[in-house]
Image (spheres, rainbow, N blue to C red):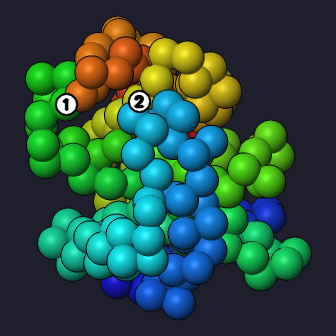
Amino acid sequence: MKIIIETERLILREILPTDEEAFFEMDGNPDVHKYLGNNPAKSMEDVRTMIRFICKQYIDYGIGRWAAIEKSTGNFIGWSGLKFITEAENNQTNFHDVGYRLIPKYWGKGYATESAKAALRYGFEQMNLEEIIGTAHVENTKSRRALEKCGLTFIEKFDSKGLPCDWLKITKEEWNNLHH
């Protein structure tokens, strides 16, 4: 898989082993994991395992989270994109989820929304998906707001591995109505 997507300020491309140090800067940060169960990466081996898992998703499902690269600097700022979820979540399986995770110094700049919109466009226009889900911890109002800016609407609250979360969704028809 060699998908490369450009937005106004970002390049979204597959995650590579060479991203591991910046990936660790992101995933080893406790602030990044505040709403994710407080389980940050503890070692480079943890990060390598995560990168291998994402790369396997590219092969198994034709999609996985992408590295988000800031065009102006060439810096890895986090990951964003679609993930095919095969484990039960909110009594659902085998669905596509849009998500993002950024290094904190890149928070509040609109990168989550910008990259998620590109992922949604790819999902609906290239993969021909019928719907895409987004989830956020109920206290992570900024993440939920980013999803809503992309057109996802709140469906319900649910428990995700003991964490209270919001379930949001957008359909292909809703996406088309917003963008055509």
Q: Is residue 11 visible?
A: no
Q: Residue 70 appears in which quarter of the rendering?
A: bottom right
Instruction: Give how far across and how far down residue 121 sits, in percent.
Output: 51, 52
Give the residue at the far bottom of this rendering. Answer: 18
Any mark on residue 31, and which?
Answer: none
Specify few, some or many for label 1: CA neighbours under 10 Å numbering under 14, 14-19, or 20 or more.
some
Which is nearer the eye, 43 or 99? Answer: 43
Residue highlighted by disc 1: 89
Q: Amino acid at mark 1?
A: Glu
Give the residue at the far right of this rendering. Answer: 72
Which is nearer the eye, 100 or 17? Answer: 17
Q: Is residue 68 above or below residue 44?
A: above
Q: Earlier in the sequence, mark 2 or mark 1?
A: 1
Report the quarter where the N terminus lies.
Answer: bottom left
Which element is circle 1 on? loop
Which is nearer the eye, 112 or 122? Answer: 112
The answer to whether 68 appears left or right of 176 in the picture is right
Specify few, some or many for label 2: CA neighbours under 10 Å numbering under 14, 14-19, or 20 or more.
many
Any mark on residue 135, and which?
Answer: 2
Q: Amino acid at mark 2?
A: Thr
Q: Residue at x 41, y 45 (%)?
A: 39
Q: Is residue 89 above or below residue 20?
A: above
Q: Is residue 61 visible?
A: yes
Q: Is residue 22 above or below residue 160?
A: below
Q: Residue 93 appears in which quarter of the rendering?
A: top left
Label 2–label 1 contact, CB within 8 A: yes
Give the residue at the far top of this rendering. Answer: 156
The answer to whether 9 appears left or right of 6 in the picture is right
Instruction: Give how far across and how far down residue 8 sits, in percent.
Output: 79, 63
Report the quarter where the C terminus lies.
Answer: top right
